[in-house]
Amino acid sequence: MNDTILEVRHLSKSFGRNHVLKDIDFAVRPGDVTSIIGASGSGKSTLLRCINLLETPTSGEILFHGENIAGGKVNANSYRSKVGMVFQSFNLFNNMTVLENCMVGQTKVLKKSHEEAKANAMKYLEQVGMAPYIKAKPRQISGGQKQRVAIARALAMEPEVLLFDEPTSALDPEMVGEVLSVMRDLAKEGMTMLVVTHEMAFARDVSNHVVFMADGVICEEGEPKELFEHPKQDRTREFLSRFMER
């Protein structure tokens, strides 16, 4: 297991008496594109928020290169620069331009110079097709464009792993494709990605590993072809049947 970047062991999370995650185990290796699928309320986003330290696990471990980062002794900002996150609601700073949004984390957390941060931000904004909009504020661009800026901002920190929390769920249908296209390109380049998604075609065609969750547990996981074509669990079959019929 030496090649594992991220490993979740016996992870549980409760909010009062509500047990949202129960004994979750899985591992992420370099270059993996892992899609986490399941109905709303199955615990997918909470799992990602625990991995990014936005929620504190009730029990269990989250190992990053073998170190348990769930113990409360890790510098969260430093860790998040290596394990970045793209949110469904973009989370851009509305008072900053597109370029400034992609520079601020680099200068504040990575302590890069203004010039270095700008050059790096431009590189990734060009990669996601947003270089022409560097002077725009978030209110002046579309949802799909905001999400592409959010991806560029995360990439500018040059993380080892990128977490995506339903990155297309807040978008109009015509904008979904442009964001998925960027994510497909990242996967081809070997970016290690953990993606909570309702986009079944992405999970099936782009991932190399799929995790199906229901009621806070992992019901089934495996290679996309095997899981989509030969699901072993009734719950997986029932969930996927809606997609396969389409």
Image (spheres, rainbow, N blue to C red):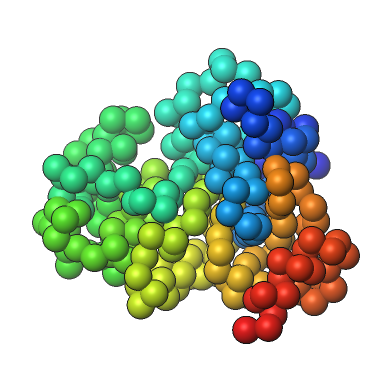
Count of marks overlaid on the render: 0
Residue in the foreground of this view, choosing between 76 and 131: 76
Extreme residue toward the right, this view: 232
**Residue 165, how many percent across, how many down?**
50, 51
- The image quadrant where one finds the C terminus is bottom right
The answer to whether any part of residue 123 appears in the image is no
Can you say whether 174 is above or below 162 in the image? below
Residue in the foreground of this view, choosing between 210 and 184: 210
Q: Looking at the image, which residue is at 44% across and 37% down?
A: 81
Residue in the foreground of this view, choosing between 62 and 160: 62
Q: Looking at the image, which residue is at 60% across and 75% down?
A: 201
**Residue 170, how many percent across, how many down?**
38, 60
Q: Looking at the image, which residue is at 65% across and 37% down?
A: 20
The answer to whether any part of residue 199 appears in the image is yes
**Which quadrant holds residue 96?**
top left
Can you say whether 193 is above or below 189 in the image? above
Residue in the foreground of this view, choosing between 7 and 166: 166
Q: Looking at the image, which residue is at 72% across and 57% down?
A: 212
Can you say whether 104 is above or below 151 in the image? above
Extreme residue toward the left, this view: 135
**Residue 167, how many percent across, how many down?**
45, 58
Name the side, left or right, on which 154 lies relative to 129.
Answer: right
**Which quadrant holds residue 172?**
bottom left
**Residue 111, how many percent across, how many down?**
30, 30
- The image quadrant where one finds the N terminus is top right
Extreme residue toward the bottom, this view: 246
Name the side, left or right, on which 36 lies relative to 122.
Answer: right
Extreme residue toward the front, this view: 17
Name the side, left or right, on which 181 lies relative to 231.
Answer: left
Name the side, left or right, on which 35 lies relative to 95.
Answer: right
